[in-house]
Amino acid sequence: MKRRYQVLSAKETQKIGEWLAKDGQLLLPMMELIEASRLAVDEVIDAVGRASIEAILHLSARGVAGAKHQGKKGGAVRWHGTQTGTAPLSNRKLRVTRPRLRQAAGEVEIPAYEAMNSGPALGQRMLDILLRGVSTRNYQRVLPEMAETVGVSKSAVSREFVEASAQSLEALVERRLDDRDWLIVYLDGMVFGATHVLAAVGVDVQGNKRVLGVVEGASENAASCVSLLESLVERGLDPAKKYLFVIDGSKALRSAIDRVFGAANPVQRCRNHKVKNVCDKLPDEFKDQVKATMKAAFRLPAKEGQARLKKQAEWLDGAGHPDAARSLLEGLDEMFTINRLELSPSLMRCLGTTNLIESPNGGVRQRTRRVSRWRDGNMVLRWAAAAFLETEERYRKIMGHADLWMLQVKLGRETNLDGKERVA
């Protein structure tokens, strides 16, 4: 049901403000909270409206200059009429009429007004709103509206977002990585319009996930892959240690890992990508059978599982599907890396695919889906970085994290009973 609203006239609003200021005891607690702890102004607005804010400003001014006395000059600080001002909310600015105070040295600030204008940054709030799917063209429909509120223009929203998202990108690409012991690095790509972005997510010895970095470029672009991995090393990921890399199957990524970290690091290719690639080359009547065979083989010991899939490839080739057979055999050895490491079933389930990074990627896509035109790579990186950092706030530990000590041992990392890497 559509609600009906009645907007008070300026004269009516003024009467409410005069009444609230006259009976100031009602608003004293609010005034003290705003002046002392800078309570979010939005909560007060939602409760009693703009007239209350103006009354609070009046009370705050009265606390500095004393009550108005007609015909008396007043003390050191005097009332000096009123002027228009704004109270910045988390997502808009509210126009208010505030008292003016003066003394011999000049203007005197009203404590409540000063506190309101030193609250949370408008730019960060706009960033949060935009990342939740509100385009700059539609923001006026979703931002809370109220009478005589000062609207912020579309260009101002975009400008604020550019500044805030640029800070997010800078924070991400400069993030230090030597504050944790990393065990696993997931690498995967995303596409925004015509621009590709390659992202890395790490898992430490306690199972905590964290975005490690993003670069512009596809996972098949060798230069981009090397650039991303070299940036991780520059920011503290020790290349002398061994890590488990989980990738989407890109040959360029595989080559970049060997180049930057060495060929001794185990690499697990995403099984979901492999199943999809094989099934895409088959008619519908064979897809379910081959998919079930592949998934069953992945649960077997490495030698036995590979043997089963080689037989499946022979059958596919004989049935007239050589492309699917070749796809199944390509990189087969690295489909069973975690089987050879003999990890726990719950840990293997998490490490067998790039789902861990694809889930955050899905969050990034959700937050950027309303962008209709990507102007350049820098714009894509800013949005991707800001969305990744917001998604990161909801990361949980990986499945099977209690068994990560097994992977530490397999990677040649000595561990204590608490699972932390031993320091020599």
Image (cartoon, rainbow, N blue to C red):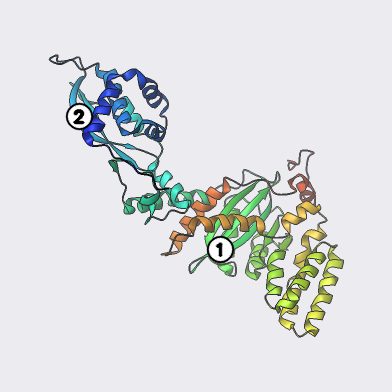
Residue denoted by label 1: 190
Taking 80 as reference, is 250 above or below it? below
Q: Residue at x 26, y 32 (%)?
A: 13
27 horizontally vs 283: left or right? left
Residue 62 figure quarter? top left
Taking 333 as reference, is 212 above or below it? above
Q: Residue at x 48, y 67 (%)?
A: 193
Mark 2: which amino acid? Answer: Thr
Q: Which dot, 2 or 1, sits closer to the camera?
A: 2
Residue 240 in picture, x, y percent from top left: 69, 53
SS at circle 1: strand
Front in this rendered view, residue 97 or 246:
97
Q: Can residue 424 be seen in this view?
A: no
Most extreme residue toward the right is: 304
Residue 68 in picture, x, y percent from top left: 20, 17
Most extreme residue toward the front is: 1
Q: Distance between the residues labelled 2 and 1?
A: 55 Å
Residue 119 figure quarter? top left
Disc assigned to residue 82 = 2
Residue 303 in picture, x, y percent from top left: 86, 67
Q: Can residue 353 be seen in this view?
A: yes
8 horizontally vs 4: left or right? left
Residue 338 in picture, x, y percent from top left: 78, 59
Mark 1: which amino acid? Answer: Met
| Precedes in sequence: disc 2 or disc 1 | 2
SS at circle 2: strand
Q: Residue at x 50, y 48 (%)?
A: 171
Q: Which residue is drawn at 42% across and 33% down?
A: 43
